Image (spheres, helix red, strand yellow):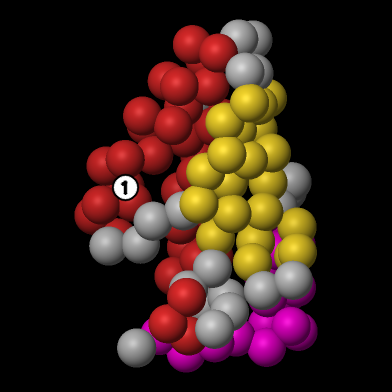
Amino acid sequence: MAERLSTAEIEAQLASLPGWSLVGDRLEQTFRFQDFLGSIAFVNRLVEPSEQAGHHPDICISWNRVTVSLTTHDAGGITQRDLDLAKVISTLAAG
């Protein structure tokens, strides 16, 4: 099982993850797109890296916005797995 990180450890890494916020026991970011099709295309790009990592985000889709939340449920909070996946997701959103 992955180890839960301290708030200080999380905040130190968030400095290199623009747009991500610490919200309770999860990392969260809302991505904006031109329309619903752009939102769905982004969500589809998340499938492969999430499957490869064996770690899946919570996703909320609202027309041109996709809110992604990351937490490690069995650790009861944020682990390195969440931060690593946040980096991948940020890269996918930029490209």
> Is 81 situated above or below 66?
below
Asked whether residue 33 appears in the rendered view, the answer is: no
Percent across and percent down for residue 19 are 74, 46
Image point 35% across, 62% down: which residue? 55
The answer to which quarter of the image holds residue 4 is bottom right
Give 90 or 23, whichever is nearer the viewer: 23
Asked whether residue 10 appears in the rendered view, the answer is: yes
Q: Is residue 16 left or right of residue 57?
A: right
> Is 5 situated above or below 95?
below
Q: Is residue 15 left or right of residue 27?
A: right
Which corner quadrant holds the N terminus?
Answer: bottom left
Percent across and percent down for residue 95 are 49, 26
The part of the chain drawn in magenta is 2-17
Percent across and percent down for residue 81 are 44, 70
Circle 1: element type: helix
> Is 69 situated above or below 74?
above
